[in-house]
Image (tube, rainbow, N blue to C red):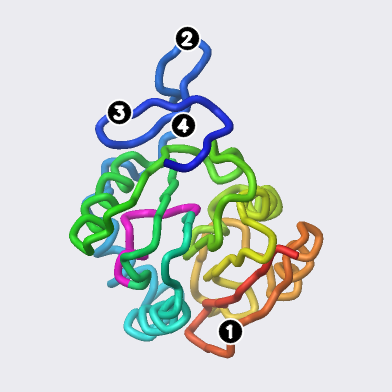
Amino acid sequence: MFQERYPTTIKRGLRYVIDEQGRPSGARPWAGELLAPLYDWSMNNSVIPRLLGADIARHDAILSTALADVHGQCVVEVGAGSGSAAQWLPNENRYVGSDISPALLRRAAKHFAAAAFDDATYYVAPAHDLPLADAQFDLALCILSLNFFGGSEAALSEIRRMLRRGGRLLCCVPVPERVPAESNVRGELLSADDLEAVCRRQGLSFQPLDETNGALLYFWATRT
């Protein structure tokens, strides 16, 4: 169990912050909660190949290679979605996944269980205010979600807070300079230069991976 800065409770296998009345707090519902069963199909067959012009097999290969040497670490994923990281991250790591969607997190729990993760915990909470205590993670993941948080700066600040000194973030996000002209990619799109500036303001280094895959930018950021 990781240390928490707010009290939480468990409901249907997920952890929620307790509100002032002692009940599980209601994180802002994800607009597509009822579509959660179609999430994986939509990402793999529509969003990634069509909207982002990226190759899903290459996407998986890039992330699997980047994480291949991550062993025995404490890992937090912000915007875990349905648990795709279970196929990239070696299963001897301790994992915490967070998202605002309970339905997606329950799917994530099934994926991580199927991948034989023995130590995995899931929090329903927004990216800018997670209940986890400071400086206890070696690695953070933020894959295809940073642009949807309603504020990259706040999310990156929160990620830095949770990382130990020298801890790393692996992030994948679409950038406007690579988005096809005909695509309507939603959320806050920051250029690679703007992302670097935000990272540096938040005390994170910035190192893009030398990989090209449609509109996607892959980068490491290290807590300095």
The reply to whether callout 3 and callout 1 are in contact (CB within 8 Å) is no
Q: Residue furthest left?
A: 114
Compare residues 48 and 90 and report the one nearer the observer. Answer: 90
Which is in the foreground here, disc 4 or disc 2? Answer: 2
Magenta segment, which residues?
78-87
* Lower sequence index among marks 4 and 2: 2
* Lower sequence index among marks 3 and 4: 3
Q: Which residue is mark 4?
A: 27
Q: Residue furthest top?
A: 21
* Lower sequence index among marks 3 and 1: 3
Label disc, if present, on residue 11 of the rendered structure: 3
Q: Residues within 10 Å of mark 4 (few under 14, many from 20)?
A: some
Quadrant where the N terminus is found in the figure = top left
Q: Is residue 172 above or below residue 214?
A: above
Q: Is residue 217 above or below residue 107?
A: below
Q: Residues within 10 Å of mark 1 (few under 14, many from 20)?
A: some
Q: Is residue 185 above or below residue 176?
A: above
Q: CA distance from mark 4 to mark 1?
A: 33 Å
The reply to whether callout 4 and callout 1 are in contact (CB within 8 Å) is no
Q: Secondary structure at mark 3?
A: strand
Looking at the image, which residue is at 34% across and 71% down? 90
* Lower sequence index among marks 2 and 1: 2
The reply to whether callout 3 and callout 4 are in contact (CB within 8 Å) is no
Q: Give residue 41's position: percent from left, percent from top.
A: 24, 64
Q: Which residue is mark 2?
A: 21
Compare residues 198 and 135 and report the one nearer the observer. Answer: 135
* Lower sequence index among marks 4 and 1: 4
Q: Secondary structure at mark 2?
A: loop
| Residue type, label 2 | Gln
Q: Is residue 43 magenta?
A: no
| Residue type, label 1 | Leu
Compare residues 74 and 106 and report the one nearer the observer. Answer: 74
